[in-house]
Amino acid sequence: MPEVLLIVGILTAVFVGYNIGGSTTGPAFGPAVGANVITKVMAAGLMSIFFFLGAYTIGPKVVTTLGEELVTDTAIFTLRSNVAVLFFIGGALFIGNYAGVPASTSMTAVGAIAALGMATGELNWDVLGEIVVWWVVAPIVGFWVAGVVGRYFYPRINAWVAIEEKEGGRPMVSVDRSGLAPRLQFGVDADRREITGALTVVAIGCLMGFSSGTSNIANAIAPIYGTGDVDMTTLILIGSAAVAVGCFTIARRTLDTLGNDITNLPLTAAIVVAVISSGIVVGLSSIGVPASFVVIATMSIVGLGWGRATRTTTLSDAARGEETPVSVGALTAEETGERSPEIGEEEPEDIPQASDLFDPSTTARVILMQNVVPAISTVGAYLTFRFLPIFGF
């Protein structure tokens, strides 16, 4: 019986990993796909590789936090309880992925494990408190850093990057398989600066994939690791393989959401968002905190657009109580490489309204589901462990 439960637990962890691949590929490569730099298939391949690298190097620190430190007694990680924990994590994430919304895997997983700890009286409240504080602080930091960049530095960065994204047709970066060995191929009319910019945004997407691996591998394997029945390396290999399957399948929906539906990011904006969000996630993972990767990336996008839109109003105008006419098409205001006017010189009509940065209904759906999915995992797990006697607690 224990062997059967272990197999079921591993299969459930695979299901969780599959949904992690679906929910994290969008934030990492959605901007690059939306800007028509790479295809969804290339995004899935790069995400799979760099997720594994992050999981194998820094990921064990976060696994230790969730699998050992979040609860005061790891004996509660029985094979039977692990199956239930992973079921609620995977089931909740599947709901988000099915809706095309990349929900936070860290919040979902921590919620389920914390629910087990609360139901058994073994929750380490100090560790949970530290994690929750960072969950609140990190998206706020991402929003305001992106906002400052959008208001004061974005036009300068845009002029420096000078990349003209290609509408439709073949992506700027593709793989030529006609020869003996595959090689990168760039757009026909792409110059050196466009190629450099395209490679930059892809490289930063890879960094985001790496940072996702450092934080999110724990969400799939931490409960199994807590039992001590399977070693860390084996679990990381299994979890990463499951993530790769999710990247190539269900991730297509979240790539559409963050790459096309919620935002139509120029390459310059994609680079800025990727740098900010990946930097925060890697920093938190290095100290063992499971970062809310999706929320940080989403809030960085929102903050960047808000900061760019506020360039129509100076600080002195704001101090006099003048309303800032914020346009949702803010990040599409400049042509590629164009130097923008100084702050306050632009008129609201100079910022396009037709090509909206945010679709209000999609944005509302994303924000709603990013809260609903972790709530489903947490409440469902707590009620199960608290009131069903089959777990022996």
Image (cartoon, rainbow, N blue to C red):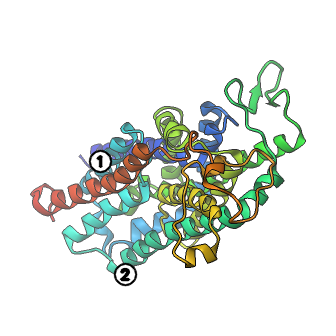
Give amino acid for label 1.
Phe
- Image: 387 above or below 100: below
Q: Quadrant of residue 116?
A: bottom left
Using the image as rendered, state which of residue 25 and residue 51 is in the foreground.
25
Q: Amino acid at mark 2?
A: Asp
Which secondary structure lies at badge 1?
helix
Per the rendering, the mark at residue 361 is none
Residue 2 rendering spot, x and y as whole percentages: 27, 49
Q: Which residue is mark 2?
A: 126
Q: Quadrant of residue 228?
A: bottom left
Residue at position x 83%, y 21% in the image: 180
- 128 sits to left or right of 188: left
Q: Which residue is mark 1?
A: 87
Cα distance between the residues tagged 1 and 2: 26 Å
Residue 125 percent location from the top left of the image: 32, 79
Q: Residue at x 55, y 78 (%)?
A: 320
| Residue found at the very far right of the displayed protein | 192
